[in-house]
Image (spheres, rainbow, N blue to C red):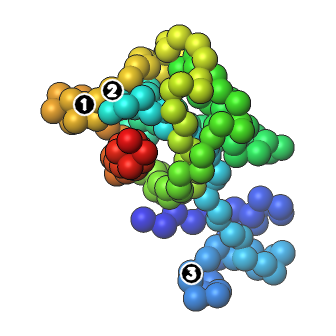
């Protein structure tokens, strides 16, 4: 579902819709320009320990109550890897250095309100982290889960992250088996 803004953020005029660059866009007739809606950038970390992954139980929308990757929005002047490390510490009490992170992938998440979030996902092994796992201020719980055990339980995984968690564990297990 595409949600269009109603008013121009520059002049406050009501926006029209106009077909520009192959899509319908909000358009300000007063400013004579399209109003682009870009995905909000986020960063997160998948912390792996053998067949387990560190997850947080969400207390904020979307997917309140589900288990998810520790992640959050970038500050305006923050590099993605710095945001990922900051969010990991804030949500789980676990810390690591930005240089230990491996870029794992991206995930475009559409929220029920029509906003889109582009999550830059990093992966790190637990052996290069410090701290005791504890739920931060915006998490109901934080702990390492065996993904299969989590799937077999009554708990839910935030739907947009489930494939990423499986892929991160699968890649790690494959890397470990080839290095033996």
Q: Where is the C terminus found, in terms of image quarters?
A: top left
Name the residue carrying label 2.
145
Q: Looking at the figure, which quarter contains the N terminus?
A: bottom left
16 sits left or right of 107 in the view: right
Comes first in the chain, label 1 or label 2: 2
Rendering quarter of residue 58: top left
Front-most of residues 29 and 67: 67
Q: Which residue is mark 3?
A: 24
Secondary structure of the residue carrying tag 2 is strand
Q: Residue furthest front?
A: 180
Q: Within 10 Å of the Cα at label 2, are there few (<14), some (14-19), or many (20+) other Cα atoms?
A: some
The secondary structure type at the circle numbered 3 is: strand
Tell me the distance, in whole angstroms, between the alpha carbons under discs 3 and 2: 43 Å
Across and down, in percent, residue 121 comes to: 55, 47
Q: Residue at x 15, y 33 (%)?
A: 152
Q: Are marks 1 and 3 in contact (CB under 8 Å)?
A: no
Distance from Cα at disc 1 to Cα at disc 3? 41 Å
Q: Residue at the spot x=62%, y=30% of the render? A: 87
Is label 1 or label 3 in front?
Answer: 1
Are dots 3 and 2 in contact, CB under 8 Å? no
Q: Position of residue 25 (x, y in %)?
A: 61, 77
Residue that badge 1 annotates: 150
Q: Is residue 29 above or below residue 155?
A: below
Residue at point 42%, 29% (across, down): 49
Q: Is residue 61 above or below residue 113?
A: above
Q: Residues within 10 Å of mark 3 (few under 14, many from 20)?
A: few
The image shows residue 141 at horizontal and vertical percentages of 41, 17
């Amino acid at each position: 579902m595409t949600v269009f803004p109603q008013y121009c953020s520059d002049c406050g005029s009501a926006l029209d819709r106009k077909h520009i660059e192959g899509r319908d866009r909000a358009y300000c007739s007063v400013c004579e320009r399209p109003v682009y809606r870009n995905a909000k950038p986020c960063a997160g970390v998948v912390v792996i320990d053998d067949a387990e992954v560190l997850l947080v139980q969400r207390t904020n929308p979307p997917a309140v109550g589900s288990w998810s990757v520790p992640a959050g929005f970038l500050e305006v002047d923050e590099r993605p890897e710095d945001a990922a490390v900051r969010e990991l510490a804030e949500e789980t009490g676990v810390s690591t250095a930005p240089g230990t992170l491996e870029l794992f992938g991206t995930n475009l998440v559409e929220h029920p309100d029509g906003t889109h979030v582009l999550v830059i996902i990093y992966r790190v092994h637990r052996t290069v982290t410090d701290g005791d796992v504890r739920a931060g201020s915006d998490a109901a719980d934080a702990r390492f889960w065996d993904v299969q055990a989590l799937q077999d339980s009554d708990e839910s995984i935030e739907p947009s992250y489930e494939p990423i968690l499986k892929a991160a564990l699968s890649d790690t297990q494959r890397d470990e088996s080839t290095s033996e």
